[in-house]
Amino acid sequence: MLKINQIWKNILLETEAKVSTLAYDLYINSLEPVGIYHDRLILVAETRALKNIVDNNYKDVLKKCMAVVFPSLIDVEIITEDDLPNVGSVEKEVNIPLGKGFVPIGEERATFVSQYTFDNFVVGKSNEYAAAVARAIAENPGTRYNPLFLWGGVGLGKTHLMHAIGNYIQRTFPEKRIMYVTCEQFVNEFIESLHDTKNPNAIKNFRAKYRKLDILMMDDVQFLAKKEGTQEEMFHTFNELYLSDRQIILSSDRPPKEIQIEERLKTRFGTGVIADIQPPNLETRIAILQKKCNAKGYNVNIKVLTLIAEKITTNIREMEGMLNRIISYSTLVGGDPNDINMVNEALKDYEDSSNDIIDIEQIVAATCEYFRVKKEDLVGKKKTKDIVIPRQICIYLICDILGQSMPLVSIGDYFGKRDHTTIMHARDKISEECKNSDVIASQVKDIRDKIYNR
């Protein structure tokens, strides 16, 4: 028997991947389940306006998602609280057939976004190696390419590939114990287990949870940096799984050698396969948008998709967000998403904010202007004091302002093919100087102000 909340949570999991984040947060997730009436799911909306929006724009999506997890439920009815007295007798707990997308909520079972599969992952030159390795691991986990370390910038598809592996393994090897966890979750769970004085077995249970897995998938492992206790725990967890041929899959926004972790962990992370995902070229970006449109039933022509792909070059997630913005705007105003005037109107706010985006060229230009040095000297091999200090300050500002969107290797390439360790040294040195030297701190502040006030 399934309770109505379990049913609704499963439908939400399926729906979240099919609509925009804005639509999910504003409309879908604000609905509350009432019960089941025969083959119909009854949901209550807070207002009549919300009911009308869902009825007109998202009811068909809800029905399709519901069919994936509960095929015997064929209709959704949205009501308001005023309609509750007229609903009649509904069932709060039912015994119904389960579809392939059902997830047993509450069990120790990884939840993967069903939309993220290998079939809808667009492969191009920027990611073909990572995609091939990921598929090989999914087909034979724990036998080859162990561990897999995926790295790349934000929004380039690392999470998609990890969920694709998870979905494939759960479907093909249902007996496998698999867990997908962010590094932050792992850290928090470990800390909680250390401080759980009421449960003497807390740390033992934590270790059993992770060391008895067949597949461990951990996202954003760069957050292990400077967490010595968690690094120690991760080291032993890694060894336990690796030595017993169980699959480990890790992702980060930078390669292992750039993460500030113990050398023994860096070595282990790099033992298997390190696969990077680079920003896709224009053709691949357009193909990604076309696949997105096909999956969601959007009727958007190639001209509009090309416009989006030309505007966003390094972040697939942001590119999809722009597409969703156009669709949402056209739906709300009753316009045509292929009308270029309507598209420009939809992206007006985006255009205004995009003018404020800071890139490496602006930071370099501001530094050169402040210190009155030439760009070719700043990024070149010259090592005189009048160049070295400005160069180090510039590198510090790039790391500080651009953050994870600009990996150290890329900064090193920009500065005359310098090694990433040189970039780290410059960054860390100026970071310390800002604490100890009023002159350096003042220079950094002046240049930062110049960058932001341009």
Image (cartoon, rainbow, N blue to C red):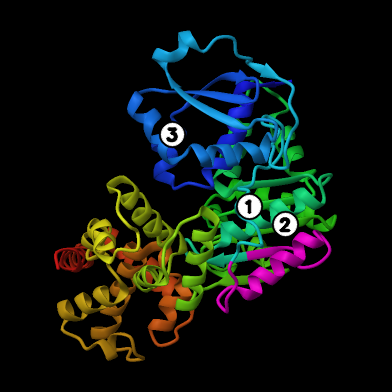
Q: Where residue 16 sits in the image (x, y, percent)?
A: 52, 43
Circle 1 SS class: strand
Which numbered disc flags the more N-terminal residue, 1 or 3? 3
Q: Amino acid at mark 3?
A: Asp
Q: Which residue is mark 2?
A: 248
Place residue 191 in its image quadrant.
Answer: top right
Give the vertical position of 385 relative to 57 (above or below).
Answer: below
Question: Residue 109: x and y, percent?
Answer: 71, 39
Disc 2 marks which amino acid? Answer: Ile
Query: Of helix, strand and loop, which one carries label 3?
Result: helix
Is label 1 in contact with label 2 (beta carbons under 8 Å)?
Answer: yes
Write down the residue under mark 1. 218
Tell me the element at label 2.
Answer: strand
- Which residue type carries mark 1? Met
Q: As drawn, is 375 to the left or to the right of 117? A: left
Q: Nearer the viewer, mark 1 or mark 3?
A: 3
- In the picture, the quarter occupied by the N terminus is top right
Question: Sequence order check: which comes first, mark 3 or mark 2?
Answer: 3
Residue highlighted by disc 3:
55
Residue 134 is inside the magenta segment: yes
Vertical placement of 321 versus 135: above or below? above
Quarter-wise, where is residue 79 in the image? top left
Q: Residues within 10 Å of mark 3 (few under 14, many from 20)?
A: some
Q: Residue at x 44, y 48 (%)?
A: 20
Bounds of the magenta span?
A: 122-149
Residue 357: x, y in percent? 27, 65
